[in-house]
Image: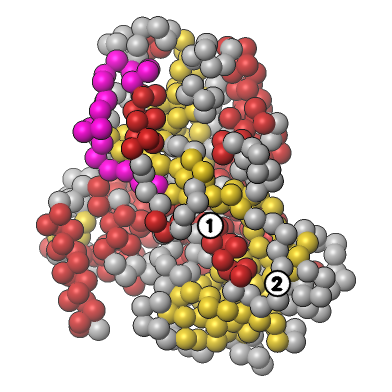
Amino acid sequence: MTDTVSRLTPLGTEDDPFDLLVVGGGINGVGVARDAVGRGLSVVLCEKGDLSEGTSSRSGKYIHGGLRYLEYYEFRLVREALIEREVVLDVAPHLAKPLRLILVHSPEQRPRWLIRLGLFLYDHLGGRKRIPASRAVNLQSEWPDGLIRSEFQSGFAYWDVWIDDARLVVLNAVDAARRGAEILTRTELSDARRQGELWCANLCDIETGDRRKVHARAIFNGAGPWVEKVLSSVDKVKSGSSVRLVKGSHIILPKWWTGDNGFVLQAPDKRIIFVNPYFEGLALVGTTDVPFDGRPEDVKIDQGEIDYLLGILNTYFTRKLRGSDILHSYSGVRPLFNDDDDKSASAVTRDYTFELDTGDKGARSGSQEDTSSRDKAPLLSAFGGKLTTYRKLAEHALDHLAPFFPKMMPAWTEGASLPGGDFSGWASSEWAVSFRQSNPWLPEGLAEHYVLCYGTDTAQMLAGASCPADLGAHFGGLFYEVEARWLLDREWARTADDMLVRRTKHGLFLTDDEKASVETWLTGIRGAA
């Protein structure tokens, strides 16, 4: 086991290949890498940018069943997602927390009986254990200060799970590395070809241009929006599947209501918009669903999306919200499985599917029972999927690869804590209180931040520290050098954005000068290396 990153040891050779090359460092790629190495496979993962740099850090920060998907009869997907809410609360209790949501009833959008039926199914499809049941609420009684416009009198309270999506990705990668996987960020798959029963792949470090060759028995393509691009770089592979790219944008504003709950608002186009608390004093609003036809790297919010989100907010809330209230925004591209070109973006399934290529018979749906071509190096590609179901996607992916690895061990991740999440029988809140009491010298709010991001690993990060001076340079807000070095040494961070935007959300609270000081510090670190 190791906590090091991107080691410069030789990669798999023809005589000693890796079992699995994973392409893509989003949630599906790291989920597969973690599961596979825990089953006894040797694994190397390459990601052309930073971990979670694409779609996986640009979600609505929810682990949720997908209440709206019930309207499209996606009962299997909803059930699987609801079950995963409970799993995530168990394995990452420091990172995930239940969030009460208030669905404001708008009779023009959906009748009350339909919402009540949907919530009944939502309560019972997933074997709910720790999540409270839904109930009706009187909006004007609950917010007598006139928060919600008077024409909206009733609503429903139900629960989903809030999570920091980018940290969920990083913690899966950290666990994979601790179990022996190679994690190579800023490393792109240039090309791959079959060489007998192995894959021979060329990887390129996008910063230095250095090339490295890796041999592996199988490839998993979990590149999300870039899944088809990866397929095009693989020699003699034909795909019968594709993804539809759909842009989803969020805006961040100052929080304008009291309480820890979020809101669910019905839009005139039958979509639903989430409004939830987002770190200290902020609110996160989204998302849009817009067909996207450009490069995923270039995605950004447009004025139409801003007007759409603000229009929905101003339909329900008495406070007039304007573009000038927006503090930040972000956009991501969802790679949805393209099962019907005629469907609207909102109606396209959020489920996932696989395509297995074994060389001689072309691409086909993966099957655990199909062993007719197990002597060929397999390429398994994932199309679609969502943050909530990443762990099940990983299990199903390895089910498809199992015929090629008869000695592979069984699934194991359901009850296995992610790094920092093993509180040894304590509730996470109790552990947090104990930690705060044991470290009264920590500046206000810092203990809570460390526990949220690193859980029990905080003790290792702060080993030997006993006063604020031991935290090193203070960049601003809650960001100190001790955390920056942890991110560099243990979590593959290389740039200020890696630290301030993805692995933490310090960037929301630092001034431009403070962010520049982080860049200056990093430049000094690189120069000293």
Q: Is mark 1 on a helix, strand or loop?
A: helix
Q: Is residue 471 above or below residue 317?
A: below
Residues shaded magenta: 314-331
Residue 135 visible in the displayed image: no
Which numbered disc flags the more N-terminal residue, 2 or 1?
A: 1
Is residue 317 rendered magenta in the image?
yes
* Quarter of the image with the C terminus in it: bottom left
Q: Residue at x 35, y 57 (%)?
A: 503
Crowd band around label 2 with a 10 angstrom C-alpha radius: few (<14), some (14–19), many (20+) = some
Q: Residue at x 38, y 17 (%)?
A: 316
Disc 1 residue type (three-letter): Pro
Q: Is residue 420 left or right of residue 230?
A: left
Q: Is mark 2 on a helix, strand or loop?
A: loop
Q: In this view, does 524 lie to the left or right of 396?
A: left
* Whole-percent x, y for residue 79 in the image: 67, 37
Give the Cα distance between marks 2 and 1.
Answer: 18 Å
Q: Identify which residue, 303 or 362, lies in the foreground.
A: 303
Q: In the rendered image, which residue does mark 1 sit on?
A: 225
Q: Identify which residue, 439 or 227, lies in the foreground.
A: 227
* Whole-percent x, y for residue 259 in the image: 32, 25
Q: Is residue 491 above or below residue 54?
A: below
